[in-house]
């Protein structure tokens, strides 16, 4: 039987799941503005979710002024990638039961 308590509540919320999925989808960092545009979230909503993920140490954000304009770049941490893969594993078990 599947242990549904293994679904990580930090990741399971729709906004945070969306962020984690985007960050896991490529090796390079995502800029705050790119995440905002892709997810169609307000600044405040996105910041709240990013802070929650940073507090859990699933992502890290780094300020950059590479092109003259400051921006924050976000990536999955090693712990974040492991948590995301574990989360996907539980979802795959759930999907297996539903088939």
Image (cartoon, rainbow, N blue to C red):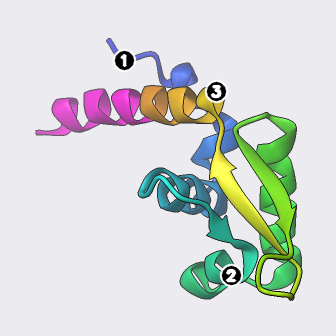
Q: In terms of image quadrants, where is residue 57?
A: top right
Residue 34 against residue 22 in the figure, above or below: below
Quick one: label 1 or label 3, which is nearer the N terminus?
1
Residue 26 against residue 85 in the figure, above or below: below
Marks 2 and 1: CB-CB under 8 Å?
no
Instruction: Report crowding for label 3: few under 14, some 14 to 19, many 20 or more residues within 10 A (C-alpha).
Output: few
Q: What residue is shown with label 2? A: 36
Task: Give coordinates of residue 99: x percent, y percent.
Answer: 10, 39
Q: Which mark is residue 54?
A: none
Task: Give coordinates of residue 64: x percent, y percent.
Answer: 83, 69
Single out the residue that lies furthest toward the top. 1
Left or right: 11 with respect to 43? left
Front residue (pair 29, 40) = 29
Q: CA distance from mark 2 to mark 1?
A: 34 Å
Indicate the secondary structure of the residue bearing disc 2.
helix
Front residue (pair 15, 2) = 15
Indicate the secondary structure of the residue bearing disc 1.
loop
Magenta segment, prevailing SS (helix, strand or loop): helix
| Residue at point 70%, 82% (across, down) | 41
Quick one: label 2 or label 3, which is nearer the N terminus?
2
Q: What residue is shown with label 1? A: 2
Q: What residue is shown with label 3? A: 79
Q: In terms of image quadrants, where is residue 42?
A: bottom right
């Amino acid at each position: 039987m599947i242990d549904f308590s293994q679904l990580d509540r930090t990741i399971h919320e729709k906004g945070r799941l969306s962020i984690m999925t985007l960050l896991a989808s490529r090796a390079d960092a995502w800029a705050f503005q790119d995440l905002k545009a892709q997810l169609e979230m307000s600044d405040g909503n996105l910041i709240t979710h990013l802070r929650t993920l940073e507090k859990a140490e699933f992502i890290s954000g780094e300020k950059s002024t590479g092109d003259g304009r400051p921006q924050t770049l976000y990536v999955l941490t090693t712990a974040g990638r492991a948590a995301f893969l574990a989360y996907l594993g539980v979802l795959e078990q759930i999907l297996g039961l539903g088939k």
